[in-house]
Image (cartoon, helix red, strand yellow):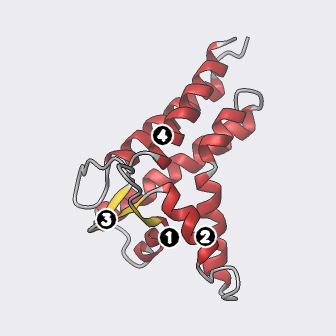
Amino acid sequence: MGAGKILMVVSGLITIVATYVLSLYYIGGTIYGWGVGAWVLAFQAGIWTSGDFLLITIEIVVILFLLAGLFQLIGAKSRWIGFLGSLLALSGFVYFMLIEFSLISSTAIYALLFAGEAIGPLPIHILLGNFVGLGAYVLAGGAVLGFIGTFASRD
């Protein structure tokens, strides 16, 4: 198996851990921004029946972001799907960084689409700023590794 395929598998696993095991950001109490919270909110809230086109579109983007690690794993076979997964993971990191540094505030409310209660010891939370947790930085690492794996040798 070539270096590109190995890097895509590793980047997919890193992205999945960053999204579902580590917290992306902290809200307060036992509420964290993480992948499990986003899945729960996506199917319990009335987002799909609200008729709000913008909210439904953003929820579709959030679901694609949540599948980024899976796309990177599939990227071991298909370069363009791996590239898409890496691009989604990196765009999620950039979004949280823009909120962290208060560069965008009008769309920061959409970060609440990731909010969810902690389940036992998960998510593992290490705050590395005012808002962003370790998961966001690990997510960026998985995305960059995925980009490298996309363009590396496959043989």
Q: Give the labeled residue for mark 2.
A: 42
Q: Give the labeled residue for mark 1.
A: 113
State how far apart marks 1 and 4 are (Cα): 19 Å
Count residues near mark 3 (Cα–Cα under 10 Å), then give few for <14, some for 14-19, many for 20+: few
The spot of residue 23 in percent (x, y) is 38, 52
State the residue at coordinates (51%, 47%).
90
Asked whether the viewer can see residue 125, the reply is yes
Amino acid type, residue under disc 3 in the picture: Thr
Count residues near mark 1 (Cα–Cα under 10 Å), then give few for <14, some for 14-19, many for 20+: many
Q: Give the labeled residue for mark 3.
A: 30
For marks 3 and 1, the one nearer the N-term is 3
Q: Nearer the viewer, mark 3 or mark 1?
A: 3
Question: Element under label 1?
Answer: helix
For marks 4 and 3, the one nearer the N-term is 4
For marks 2 and 4, the one nearer the N-term is 4
Q: Which mark is residue 18?
A: none
State the residue at coordinates (44%, 59%).
95
For marks 1 and 2, the one nearer the N-term is 2
State the residue at coordinates (64%, 71%).
43
Q: Give the labeled residue for mark 4.
A: 17
- Circles 1 and 4: CB atoms closer than 8 Å: no
Amino acid type, residue under disc 2 in the picture: Ala
State the residue at coordinates (40%, 39%).
138
For marks 1 and 4, the one nearer the N-term is 4
